[in-house]
Amino acid sequence: MARAELLERYRALPLPTTAEEPWRFTDLKGFDPDAFAANGHVSQGHDPVPGTGPRPNETLVEIDCAAVATVTEAGIEIGSVPEGITFEPLTEHERLGRLVAGDDKFTAHNAAAWEHGLLVRVPRGAVLEQPLYVRIRNEREGGSLFWRLLVIAEAESRFSLIEEYSSATAGLSGYSNAVVELYVDQGAKLEYVSLQNLSRETWHFATHHGLVERDAELDWVAGGFGSKKGKIRIQNDLAGPGATSRVTGAYFADGAQHLDYDTFQEHIAPSTTSDFAFKGALRGEATAVWRGMIRVERDAQKTNAYQENRNLLLSDKAHADSIPGLEILANDVRCTHGATLGQVDREQLFYLMARGLSRGEAERLIVRGFFQDVLDRIELEPVRDSLAAALEARIPQA
């Protein structure tokens, strides 16, 4: 579909409201996607943040990489790339748009407006010992960045990809719109890490969709720390027998932040496995919502699926909503889910403070213990350590 047609589709679709079930807990009042300068194009009142530019050393995770791409409104900078690996600006591709077609307001906006994208393709049988790293950074005050990522793990390949969203300054206001399509072909293994650390004044909307084929494995880590409000969609399609997906989510919100995760486990083929585990901690007046759905198609016998969401409230005004769901059309399956919500154990807090720890130090220990089991699921040690440090850093010292 031509960009002009996609733009018309976007304009015809209304902005979601809380009257729609998927948006019941996320109110977009005050947000106008057309009020932001797109992809760094200059418009009155939307100037670059002074003194900024690509800073490839500023990152949440310090790790030796096989290749690094830095994305800003100005474009994409790519360093050296291992021979045989495709790690280049995205233009057109036969798989582009197959998983995310632009059927809702935000994916339609992305399809119509994206200019900056990356194609990652690791050929059949290739194994990368070091991860690929993509850094997406909003730098223009009052601007928007439309980002597109297409990843193809060909048959029997194995590699890791880290994707990080950040802002040039803590107070930068903006609009971030991302679409990610992941193809994990037969027998391949992809470890995909997506970290969101945008400014507290940035609206962030993202749709991530993976397709996992026969005997392939997708190991997914989602970390959420920044942004003002928005929604992140995560969908895995288990399309081939023996396909496996595991998604590990960790998030921390404080102040007036609102995080919204919408996850979908689609079991299409028989003998497939999915395991989604999300944990979040909330302080101040922060709110979060997690909505999870497991769907098992009629032919997907021998499915094994699990989903859970657990939240820890560190203040009386923080609030979280968890909505798990099951839709099972097969009769030989094992599907379970769980959701919990709890305040900090005051006796535990008092016990730690009575032994000389400040309240902040005591809360950091409690937070580390709360997240430990999901952190233990992360295979890449630098990612595991960085997420743990980022979670603990949200607790004040005093």
Image: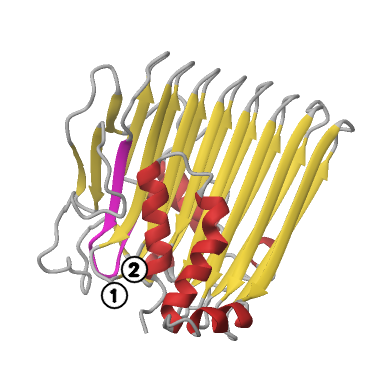
Residue in the picture at 43% in, 64% down: 391
How dense is the environment of label 2, judged by Cα within 10 Å: few (below 14), some, or many (20 and up)?
A: many
- Asked if residue 22 lies left or right of residue 249, the reply is right
Predominant secondary structure, magenta span: strand
- Outermost residue on the top side: it is 125
Residue 258 locus on image (x, y percent): 51, 71
| SS at mark 1 in the image | loop
- Outermost residue on the front side: it is 355
Nearer the observer, 183 or 60: 60
Asked if residue 9 shows in the view, the reply is no
Q: Which amino acid does label 2 sit on?
A: Ser
Magenta region: which residues?
132-145
Rendering colour mode = secondary structure
| SS at mark 2 in the image | loop
| As drawn, 211 above or below 373 | above
Residue in the picture at 42% in, 83% down: 358
Nearer the observer, 387 or 159: 387
